[in-house]
Image: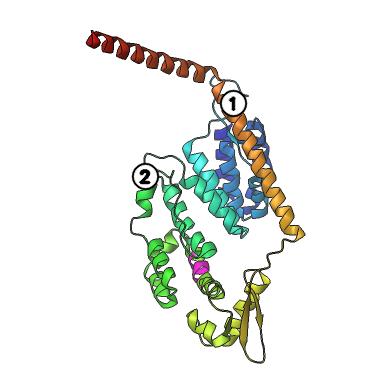
């Protein structure tokens, strides 16, 4: 059934937008047919997201991504039509990579970073093309969201750790980002334009460039209490046009990125500390996060209990215990002989 869904998705893509839109409902039905539970990942997940990306219906794909995944389909053997499909490393990586692209399309950049991290931290003995492309997007998203490249987790494979240190245009962009030199960054973009466009990352690169000034302004709020619009423009490496600076400040204030007041008469900007009082919305978000943490903790305990009580685990641990006991007995006998 997986092969049928994959061929069906490709056929819809080849036929164009109307066919792709019509294929989404059958693909979703096939996906659900292969699932043991709604929390199970199947190979058809990646095909469904691929079609959604092609036709740019990000909101439909986002509904699938909102469902948490805690299990994957594995082949049970045999020829039964009810046997779940096998999730391959490629389909696993593709799901999280496509999911990140969907989140970028819906402008949920923090969620996109989390999905990319799942793909990047997948165990690997060789570098996957999906992981290589995912790392480039990870760097650009980190620059946009955090203003710096966050290091990969320590459990990332050494293959990918080594790749992350190799020369590439994303590392050059990250180095220029540190100095907030818009001119140097623009020069790198122009020089590396063919490679950037080949990776289809020009949109993210431009967004990272646009966010550089915002991150610089955000840094200024931690150092100064009051600055003029012209001083902010100078510090952030922006044109001397105060109208552009003012527009960016208004946007950052409306988005809740900073708290500030602009005096229209003097042209001074007064930065304020963030309100430490938790409102009802924040309390609800915290409660939601805590509920998710508790749920995940309970699931981990259940998975652990399932593993330690499984027949294969008990058999392996018994063999290990027997081997350890034999070594202890052998060591004791050797010691007694020597003592005599």
Which disc number belongs to residue 305?
Answer: 1
Point 34% across, 50% down: residue: 162
Q: Residue at x 62, y 69 (%)?
A: 257
Q: Which picture quadrant has residue 190?
A: bottom left
**35 over 198 or under it: above or below:** above
Any mark on residue 200, and which? Answer: none
Where does residue 5 sit, x and y in percent of width and height?
Answer: 59, 37
Q: Where is residue 58 drawn, in percent x and y? A: 64, 54
Residue 135 left/right relative to 55: left
Crowding at mark 2 (Cα within 10 Å: few <14, some 14-19, many 20+):
some
User: As rendered, which of 153 and 81 lies closer to the eye?
Assistant: 153
Q: Earlier in the sequence, mark 2 or mark 1?
A: 2
In the rendered image of this protein, does residue 61 appear above or below residue 207? above
In the image, residue 114 lies in the stretch drawn in magenta: no
Residue matched to label 2: 158
Where does residue 339 sit, x and y in percent of width and height?
Answer: 24, 11
Report the magenta stretch's main SS: helix
272 with respect to 152 (left or right): right
Please report the residue visible at 63 percent of the width from the left and 81 percent of the height from the top. Answer: 270
Give the colouring mode of the picture.
rainbow
The quadrant in which the C terminus is found is top left
Where does the magenta region start and end?
Answer: 205-209
Q: Is residue 67 visible?
A: no
Q: Quadrant of the N terminus?
A: top right
* Residues marked 2 and 1 touching at CB (< 8 Å): no
């Amino acid at each position: 059934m997986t092969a049928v869904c994959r061929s069906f998705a490709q056929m819809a893509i080849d036929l164009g937008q109307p066919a792709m839109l019509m294929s989404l409902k059958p693909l979703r039905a096939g996906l659900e047919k292969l699932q043991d539970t709604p929390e199970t990942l199947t190979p058809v997940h990646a095909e469904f997201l691929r079609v959604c990306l092609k036709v740019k219906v990000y909101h439909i794909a986002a509904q699938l991504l909102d469902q948490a995944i805690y299990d994957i389909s594995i082949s049970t053997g045999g020829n039964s039509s009810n046997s779940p499909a096998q999730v391959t490393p490629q389909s696993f990586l593709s799901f999280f990579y496509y999911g990140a692209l969907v989140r970028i399309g819906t402008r949920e950049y923090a969620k996109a970073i989390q999905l990319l991290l799942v793909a990047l931290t997948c165990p690997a003995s060789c570098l996957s093309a999906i992981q290589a492309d995912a790392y480039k997007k990870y760097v650009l998203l980190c620059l946009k969201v955090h203003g710096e490249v966050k290091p990969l987790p320590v459990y990332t494979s050494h293959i990918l750790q080594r790749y992350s240190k190799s020369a590439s245009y994303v590392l050059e962009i990250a180095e220029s980002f540190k100095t907030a030199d818009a001119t140097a960054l623009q020069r790198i973009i122009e020089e590396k334009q063919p490679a950037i466009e080949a990776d289809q990352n020009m949109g993210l690169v431009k967004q990272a460039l646009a966010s550089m000034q915002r991150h610089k302004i955000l840094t200024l709020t931690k150092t100064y209490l009051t600055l003029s619009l012209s001083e902010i423009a100078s510090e952030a490496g922006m044109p001397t046009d105060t109208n552009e600076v003012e527009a960016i400040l208004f946007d950052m204030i409306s988005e809740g990125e900073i708290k500030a007041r602009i005096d229209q008469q003097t042209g001074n900007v007064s930065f304020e500390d963030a309100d430490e009082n938790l409102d009802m919305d924040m309390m609800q978000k915290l409660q939601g996060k805590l509920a998710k943490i508790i749920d995940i903790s309970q699931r981990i305990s259940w998975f652990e209990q399932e593993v330690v009580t499984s027949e294969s685990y008990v058999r392996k641990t018994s063999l290990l215990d027997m081997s350890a006991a034999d070594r202890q007995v052998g060591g004791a006998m050797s010691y007694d002989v020597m003592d005599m």
